[in-house]
Image: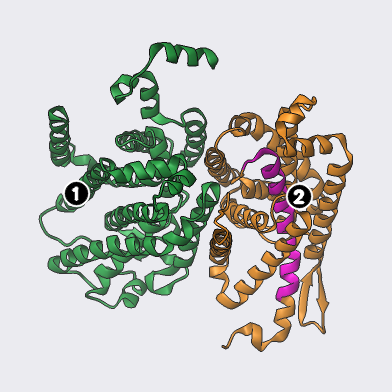
């Protein structure tokens, strides 16, 4: 086996670190997905496209001379209202319906967003240069862009902030109550319609943060949304709904897997390996459950 | 029965004469046939069995690549063909072309069927949205992976053998039209035959309540796999024909086009009404006409329109055209309606 990873051991460290920092970002997106899946029982295929849209907001700030780092503040605010708009237009009509309806409807939104972004921003691969420089580790054999460290820290701050908000605030309590039993929450005076809208808005805002960070750290492109959706879906099904440490851990695991797949299989198979991993995980879970005559549901 | 026979004969005659009546639309009509095949076979899963798959695109793309590869590989080295961009270096003689096409179509239909049988046990054990997402992943993964394989053209695409210079200018269009019409007739006969047997009832039982069906002693997994294999057979065949018709195969834009064709088949079946024999056919026809209109007059905005269309159809017409008709004229569908009961139900709503 003449893989580069085994010849240069430091590349392993590089891939591990890259994967870890990338995985924290994935976990942030997955957190949003877990939130709205748990509360509204909706799988949002447009999740990745919301991320990319958030990235374009940061990119545009960069184009107009504002430091893209501020995108992590501006982008979620804009995306929150975008999310509420999507909820009011489409999602509120599919909340109580069959899950497949929501998958298809959000698939439609995903295609719509993808194409609108393609029109508005062009089909080029872009990135917002943050100018944070890089850190060299281990006698210059491992390069670590500071923007990645920045993105990991911001993700963690936002995730912790949201956890605290969900625990302490009134809206957070209402959201958790609705997730447990929407009907009972309604009887006890929670305006579930409002809670749903807020949940979708928060999800979109999280996507906005993640998108802004991705536009700083990596690159964005109008058609890159779907892999982010699949990644967050995968993280959520591995971790389970409402298991936040699990989401963080499996996010990092996925990040590391991707970096190694990138090195070992080559970049052209990177996205393919993510989708294949999803299939393998689902099949594995299916066989594990079928021993007890149960199934994924 | 007699009325049905006249209807079928009429459609058959219309289908056989269509390329001569509308000579300018031969390619469109061929694509329509392919779309109907895809929608009808999707309906076996999504409509009758209740397994909403995005993964039939896998068999379609597989069939497309296999047909073209066999057609080339039978006579020329495949790697050199794809490297040179195909038609410039090697030329198929007419006999070679048709022999290759025939062999290619057989392989394109059989191999996806086997693949469906092999992966069926693992994938069909998933249910509901997990199945939907898993098959979505399968389709996209196939596209991404085939885009990295050198011998079938990788990212730069695969040119299928051009139609040989026989039979005049119209020959190509007519050949592909009759090929796809043949596939359509074959699909329709098979699906109709299936729908009149116990097999369809079993599929419906799986859709309505799989656990109960299993408790009644039906080996649900066996029937699910057979159903998927039937779909895979026709999807592969359709893919093979489509590859020849388009003339160029790209991994993510033509073959494993989960964003377009993969969603189209779902949409067409839903638009016409899933779970009916004629629904997907009507849905595909309406959809194709609508799509072509949009593609022509709003070039560039077609995907925006497509996204809006998906959302509107899914939210407002989840039962489709046939479902709407069924609601309106239940007697025509052989349902006995108790008027008092219906009124009571309407009041309850």
Query: Within the magenta stretch, is there residue A19?
Result: yes
**Helix, strand or loop under label 2:** helix
- For the residue pair B163 and B340, the one nearer the viewer reads as B340
Q: Position of residue B229 (x, y in %)?
A: 34, 56
The answer to whether marks 1 and 2 mark residues whose Cβ atoms lie closer than 8 Å is no
Separation (CA) of disc 1 from disc 2: 53 Å
Q: Is residue B233 magenta?
A: no
Task: Say which chain is green.
Answer: B
The residue depicted at 66 percent of the width and 33 percent of the height is A87
Q: Colour of chain A?
A: orange
Residue B342 horizontal side relative to residue A45, left or right: left
Does residue B89 show up? Answer: no
- For disc 2, the marked residue is A209
The foreground one among A253 and B303 is A253
**Which residues are drawn in magenta?**
A15-42
Report the chain holding disc 2: A
Marker count (numbered): 2
Label 1: which residue?
B182
């Amino acid at each position: 086996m003449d893989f580069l990873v085994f010849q240069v051991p430091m590349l392993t460290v590089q891939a591990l670190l890259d994967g870890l920092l990338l995985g924290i970002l994935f976990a942030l997106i997955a957190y949003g997905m877990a939130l709205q899946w748990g509360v509204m029982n909706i799988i949002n295929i447009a999740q990745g496209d919301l991320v990319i849209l958030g990235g374009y907001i940061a990119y545009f700030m960069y184009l107009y001379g504002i430091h893209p780092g501020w995108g992590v503040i501006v982008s979620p605010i804009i995306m929150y209202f975008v999310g509420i708009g999507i909820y009011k237009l489409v999602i509120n009509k599919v909340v109580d319906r069959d899950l497949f309806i929501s998958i298809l409807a959000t698939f439609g939104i995903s295609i719509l967003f993808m194409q609108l972004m393609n029109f508005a921003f062009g089909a080029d691969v872009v990135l917002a240069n943050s100018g944070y420089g890089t850190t060299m580790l281990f006698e210059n054999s491992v390069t670590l862009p500071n923007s990645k460290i920045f993105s990991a820290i911001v993700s963690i701050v936002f995730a912790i902030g949201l956890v605290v908000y969900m625990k302490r605030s009134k809206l957070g309590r209402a959201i958790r109550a609705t997730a447990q039993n929407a009907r009972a929450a309604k009887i006890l005076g929670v305006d579930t319609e409002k809670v749903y809208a807020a949940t979708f808005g928060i999800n979109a805002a999280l996507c906005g943060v993640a998108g802004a960070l991705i536009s700083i750290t990596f690159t964005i492109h109008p058609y890159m949304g779907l892999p982010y959706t699949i990644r967050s879906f995968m993280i959520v099904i591995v971790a389970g709904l409402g298991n936040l440490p699990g989401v963080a851990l499996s996010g990092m695991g996925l990040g590391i897997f991707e970096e190694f797949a990138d090195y070992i299989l080559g970049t052209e198979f990177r996205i393919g390996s993510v989708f294949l991993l999803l299939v393998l995980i689902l099949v594995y879970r299916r066989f594990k459950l079928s021993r007890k005559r149960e199934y994924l549901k | 029965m007699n009325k049905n026979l006249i209807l079928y004969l009429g459609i058959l005659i219309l289908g056989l004469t269509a390329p001569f009546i509308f000579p300018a639309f031969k390619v469109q009509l061929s694509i329509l046939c392919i779309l109907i095949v895809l929608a009808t076979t999707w309906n076996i899963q999504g409509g009758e069995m209740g397994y909403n798959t995005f993964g039939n695109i896998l068999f379609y793309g597989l069939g497309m690549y296999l047909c073209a590869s066999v057609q080339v590989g039978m006579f020329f080295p495949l790697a050199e063909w794809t490297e040179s961009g195909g038609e410039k270096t090697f030329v198929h003689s007419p006999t070679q072309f048709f022999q290759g096409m025939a062999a290619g179509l057989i392989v394109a239909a059989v191999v996806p069927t086997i693949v469906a049988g092999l992966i069926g046990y693992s994938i069909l054990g998933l249910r509901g949205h997990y199945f939907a997402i898993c098959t979505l992943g399968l389709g996209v993964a196939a596209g991404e992976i085939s885009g990295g394989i050198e011998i079938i053209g990788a990212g730069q695409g695969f040119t299928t053998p051009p139609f040989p210079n026989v039979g005049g200018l119209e020959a190509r269009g007519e050949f592909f039209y009759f090929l796809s019409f043949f596939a359509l007739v074959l699909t329709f006969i098979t699906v109709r035959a299936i729908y009149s047997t116990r097999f369809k009832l079993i599929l419906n039982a799986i859709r309505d309540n799989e656990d109960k069906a299993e408790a009644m002693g039906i080996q649900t997994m066996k029937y699910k796999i057979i159903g998927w294999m039937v779909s895979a057979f026709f999807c592969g065949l359709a893919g093979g024909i489509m590859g020849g018709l388009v003339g160029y195969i790209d991994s993510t834009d033509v073959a494993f086009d989960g964003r377009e064709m993969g969603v189209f088949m779902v949409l067409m079946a839903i638009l016409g009404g899933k779970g009916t024999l004629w629904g997907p056919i009507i849905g595909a026809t309406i959809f194709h006409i609508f799509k072509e209109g949009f593609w022509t007059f709003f070039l560039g905005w077609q995907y925006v329109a497509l996204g809006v269309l998906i959302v509107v159809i899914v939210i407002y017409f989840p039962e489709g055209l046939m479902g709407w008709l069924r609601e309106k004229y239940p007697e025509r569908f052989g349902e006995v309606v108790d008027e008092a009961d219906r009124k009571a139900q309407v009041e309850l709503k």
